[in-house]
Amino acid sequence: MRRGIDIAVAVICLSLFWAAESRVGAPPSRVTVRIAECANSQASQLLLLKLADSFGKLDVGTVTWQTLKGDTAEDLENSSRADIVGVFDVVFTGDRDFASKLERIGLLRASFTVFMEELILAGPVASVGQFSGISTEEVMRRIFSEERTFFSLFKNKWIADAEAELYRRSKITAPGANRRYVESSRGDIEALIQAGDENAFILICEASFAQYQDSQRDSPVLAKISGTGIFKETRMCLISDSGFRRERVAAADRYAEWLLSPDGGDAVESFEMGGINPFRSGSH
């Protein structure tokens, strides 16, 4: 009887040892980090997907990415606090006020810039040589003094604010009759095509212009005239830990650490669209 008990105890101990060994050697469980994108361009979304894919390749088997999109920053702000905590772990947003909105309702754990895209001035291909080596401010003054057609994307608040800043820097007191508005229903690419059709100049994010070049690679009628030195930041906002999703929060933190590392910055810098990289890393 005693011998039987000893054998049973030995089997149980051995089983526990094997179980412990298998747990040590097993790959970590998959964790789904839920990401919302707000107020980002299509090009920005492509970069974010590339960054998620790059991190997954470097860190095999630990994180599954599920991208959830909010149409606007207001959509998420109008959601209840419980809805945001329960659904999202990370929010990527190009809306510079959105991090402060999350902070106001007590959801922001941390926030930092992942990448930036510059506002550029684009115009007819034939005009590139005329403005070579001239500052953006001087180009703007000439556009308005010569009454060349200039399009405004009034539906985009960030570009509207940046345009006002550029007027101030260029000492343009008020836009003239040559300033026209792009049809509000048009997206960035359609707006650029409209500007090209009408031989106009337009302020646009460089990422949107890269998409235009990619779509019109055979015969683009617009070219980049100059950069403005005004940048739009896309920020990663980490949502507060609600307690029941600690594994997801830990995975999101590891992703944030990678994005801030040189490897994460290199992944941003190696992105290409339309033959150029329209983004600058926020981690260098």
Image: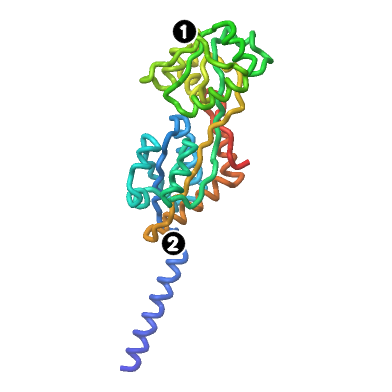
Q: Given the image, on which type of amino acid does mark 1 rest?
A: Glu
Instruction: Write down the residue under mark 1.
Output: 198
Residue 268 coordinates in the image, percent (x, y): 55, 37
The residue sitting at 40% across, 75% down in the picture is 16
Q: Given the image, on which type of amino acid does mark 2 rest?
A: Ala
Front position in the image: 268 or 18: 268
On screen, residue 30 versus residue 218, left or right, reads left
Disc 1 secondary structure class? loop
Disc 2 secondary structure class? loop
The residue sitting at 40% across, 22% down in the picture is 187
Q: What is the residue that sits farthest to the left in this orientation?
A: 1
Instruction: Write down the residue under mark 2.
Output: 26
The mark that comes first in sequence, 1 or 2, is 2
Q: CA distance from mark 1 to mark 2?
A: 62 Å
Front position in the image: 149 or 171: 171
Which quarter of the image is occupied by the N terminus? Answer: bottom left
* Residue 200 makes an appearance in the image: no
The residue sitting at 49% across, 35% down in the picture is 47
